[in-house]
Image (tube, helix red, strand yellow):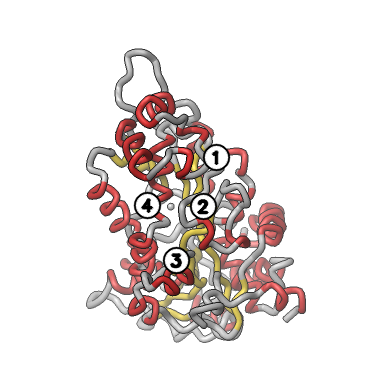
Amino acid sequence: MEETMARKHFIIGAASLAVLALAGCSGDADATDGSSASGSAEAAGGVDAATATSLADFGSMEELEAAAIAEGELNVIALPHDWANYGEIIDAFKEKYPEITVNEAQPDGSSADEIAAAEDLAGQDTAPDVFDLGLAVALSSLDQFAPYQVAGWDDIDDSLKESTGLYVGDYGGYMAVGYDPDAVPAVTSLEDLLGEAYKGSVAINGDPTQAGAAFAAVGLATLQNGGSLDDFQSGVDFFEELSAAGNFLQVDVTSALIASGEVPVDFDWDYLQAANKAAMEGERNWEIVVLPDFGYASYYNQAVNVDAPHPAAARLWEEFLYSDEVQNLWLAGGARPVRAEAMSEAGTLDQDLWDALPEVPAETFVPTAEQSDAAATLLGDKWAAAVS
């Protein structure tokens, strides 16, 4: 393992938890005077919500809530209900704010699809208000975001957020391999997957040039093949070899494909693997392996659309996601909340759920912004040819 990679790994929660290294519609209410959502927020809360950069700009949580309720809607995109407990989180928001209609678009969309929708729908009431993105896509889309620092900003490590709040890490996990033990032999290493027994069986969650989970699968292969996150080439090489062997299954993985047996082996986040396993209990076996020695971990990032049609509701959603309540809901979904360390110190972390998380690898690596940028460029240049 190269020294440059060893310098970048860090143990999440080690400071106080001694644990894990860490680090997927309708419009505004009718306005006869042509006023925009941000204009209505200004009238209701005394502030231009579209330019608010923190809760302090609204004055209080109550004033932010009033401005968001006046808008009456929130547009979210690419949030599958079985992804990291998003279903329960969305339901909790609806229950807390019944006056706000939550419009859900493209639940199975990729991070790239989210940005494309924002560009295509710019200026329309149906544009996304908020995003949930892998780091590589976030870094390539900074002009699409409005800076916003949530109330729990100081609890989040500087390495996991853009300094002005253009994007902020929220929940994360380890890239893992899930497999059907009744269809293929046990997976103990990447090398196993190159064998005849895995012919046409191994898939990843999307296209790594567009989807964060697929991007991370190549990152994991890079580490497990002795490479560095400074250069994803060894990960690309692994999938090229997997494809040449006839073992790479090029499908966009869904829970339904796993449940049907069409995808016997899948690279995906450990919390998504756990959700699939739980959903199939009693019907289909599913084993989960976080490969030993070198683990790839990452956070998904929240961001506010700079052109959000409901800017107050967008900011209320962000405050909701970083609250103790929802940070524990990520944990209930098997994901690791970004404020876990601070919440543990404050006694607000659900320790039983935290203690139930899978054992972590000996060393954990999280890509920096620079490494993600370089990897995205490499994958854009080489991925399609490698697996064609």
Identify which residue, 191 or 354, lies in the foreground. 354
Residue topped by disc 4: 320
Mark 4 or mark 1, which has the lower sequence index? 1
**What residue occupies the far top of the structure in this picture?**
33
Mark 4 or mark 3, which has the lower sequence index? 4
Mark 1 or mark 3, which has the lower sequence index? 1
Residue topped by disc 3: 337
On screen, residue 135 above or below 315: below
| Residue 142 shows in the view | yes
Residue 129 at x, y percent in the picture: 43, 39
Say which amino acid is labelled 2.
Leu
Say which amino acid is labelled 1.
Ala
Q: Is residue 84 left or right of residue 362?
A: left
As measured in the structure, the alpha-carbon distance from the residue carrying label 1 to the one carrying label 2 is 14 Å
| Residue 273 shows in the view | no
Residue topped by disc 2: 133
Q: Secondary structure at mark 4?
A: helix
CB atoms of marks 1 and 3 within 8 Å: no
Say which amino acid is labelled 4.
Phe
As measured in the structure, the alpha-carbon distance from the residue carrying label 4 to the one carrying label 1 is 17 Å
Residue topped by disc 1: 146
As measured in the structure, the alpha-carbon distance from the residue carrying label 4 to the one carrying label 3 is 13 Å
